[in-house]
């Protein structure tokens, strides 16, 4: 009820709405009665959740690059968003090694552009910048990172997300201080850091669940790179609910909820890469995997977040276990691969959102 009360009739701009998380967030906000404006590049994969669910006809769909500042400003001016969820990014670690400049331009300068556009737009009241759990200086210790720990990153992607967090913190102090809200400025600014997000409709390159699904749907063997790597796996709607709750709190009490927030599972919800692959194959009904012995770029093998702040102040916690999440995910992909239409996938995705929302009641 809180989410529907907050977002019904509100103008909400989502950057990156054609991406995996952005498309799910767009659908959810549409169900809540928001006026959704999406700004993004073409869908990042073929197929994609955006196209599978036929989202281009569901709300305002604008093609644009967050590196294009003038275009962004014109969108803010034309549509007057009250809420902004900034999800547009270059999100792939391995691609960041191949294209570091593009990664930094998109993830850092793109964030600056969104913040500047919001600063110039009198309509904006809430801005949530979505970064990543990889923004932390990860020493791969048995330690859960808190929001006030140091930013860093071994690879260009992780570093770029750390930079985006530093930019957000600087804008919060310099241009959007909470004590000046309603006086010298009008934007309640926060950042959201989430662990590895999994769900239906993800076909991103070099991501575990899409790699499994692409192979299994063709009857091929699944190849995995780091079988013992541990990730804070969580169902796609879990962090999205965190973002929406955070936005709602910022709307009603801007000074108390600005700043950084972690959204991730507790220790008992972590699994190794190999364990996740085995569980997906079991639910799929058939398939096999092997470990790819080749050389691969560095990726963090151990990373977890301390989410006590979100649990205490937002009332946020995970609703699905990893087992429940994987069951919903495999059902989504199997429904897609039997040849359903856009209408069917829209209905199926809405059904999964409604099931999740029912679990919150």
Image: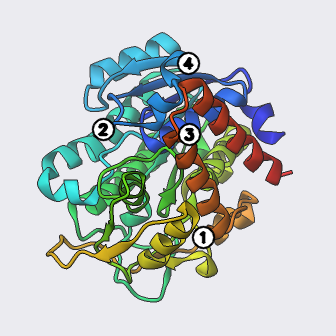
Please state if 83 lies on the left or on the right of 120 as rendered: right
User: Label 4, label 2: how many angstroms apart (C-alpha)?
Assistant: 23 Å
36 versus 24 height, above or below: above
Q: Which residue is mark 1?
A: 265
Image depth: mark 2 or mark 3 in front: 3
**Residue 29, picture quadrant:** top right
Label 3 vs label 1: CA separation? 19 Å
4 or 2: tag closer to the N-terminus: 4
Query: Residue farthest to the bottom?
Result: 142
Label located before the other in sequence (4 or 3): 3
* Label 1, residues with CA under 10 Å away: few <14, some 14-19, many ≥20: many
Which mark sits nearer the N-terminus, 2 or 3? 3
Q: Check whether the beta carbons of the residues at disc 2 and disc 3 lie within 8 A of each other.
A: no
Q: Is residue 273 left or right of residue 299?
A: right
Does residue 88 show up? yes
Q: Nearer the viewer, mark 4 or mark 2?
A: 4
Mark 3 residue element: helix
Residue visible at 45% across and 14% down in the picture: 77
Is 95 on the left or on the right of 122, as rendered?
Answer: left
Q: Earlier in the sequence, mark 1 or mark 4?
A: 4
Q: Residue 59, labelled with which disc?
A: 4
Image quarter of residue 352: top right
The first of marks 3 and 1 along the sequence is 3
Q: Which residue is mark 3?
A: 24
Image coordinates of residue 123 in percent, x first then y, are 56, 21
């Amino acid at each position: 009820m809180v989410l529907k009360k907050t977002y019904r009739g509100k103008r909400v701009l989502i950057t990156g709405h054609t991406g995996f998380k952005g498309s799910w967030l767009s659908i959810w906000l549409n169900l809540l009665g928001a006026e959704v404006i999406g700004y993004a590049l073409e869908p990042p994969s073929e197929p994609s959740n955006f196209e599978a669910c036929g989202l281009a006809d569901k709300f305002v769909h604008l093609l644009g690059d967050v590196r294009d500042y003038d275009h962004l400003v014109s969108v803010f001016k034309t549509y007057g968003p009250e809420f902004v969820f900034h999800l547009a990014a270059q999100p792939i670690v391995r691609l960041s090694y191949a294209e570091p400049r593009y990664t930094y331009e998109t993830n850092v300068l793109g964030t600056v552009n969104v913040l500047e556009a919001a600063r110039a737009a009198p309509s904006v009241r809430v801005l949530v910048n979505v970064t990543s759990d990889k923004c932390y200086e990860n020493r791969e210790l048995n330690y859960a990172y808190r929001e006030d720990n140091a930013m860093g990153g071994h690879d260009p992607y992780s570093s770029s997300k750390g930079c985006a967090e530093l930019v957000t913190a600087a804008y919060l102090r310099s241009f959007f201080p909470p004590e000046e809200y309603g006086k010298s400025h009008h934007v309640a600014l926060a950042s959201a850091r989430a662990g590895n997000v999994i769900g239906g409709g993800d076909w991103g390159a070099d991501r575990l669940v899409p790699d499994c699904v692409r192979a299994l749907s063709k009857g091929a063997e699944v190849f995995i790179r780091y079988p013992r790597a541990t990730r804070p796996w969580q169902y796609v709607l879990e962090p999205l609910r965190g973002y929406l709750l955070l936005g709602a709190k910022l709307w009603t009490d801007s000074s108390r909820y600005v700043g950084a927030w972690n959204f991730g599972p507790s220790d008992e919800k972590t699994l190794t890469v190999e364990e996740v692959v085995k569980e997906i194959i079991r639910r799929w009904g058939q398939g096999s995997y092997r470990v790819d012995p080749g050389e691969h770029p560095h990726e963090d093998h151990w990373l977890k977040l301390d989410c006590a702040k979100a649990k205490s102040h937002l009332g946020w916690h995970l609703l699905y276990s990893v087992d429940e999440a994987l069951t919903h995910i495999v059902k989504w992909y199997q429904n897609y691969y039997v040849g359903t239409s856009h209408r069917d996938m829209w209905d199926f995705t809405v059904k999964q959102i409604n099931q999740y929302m029912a679990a919150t009641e």
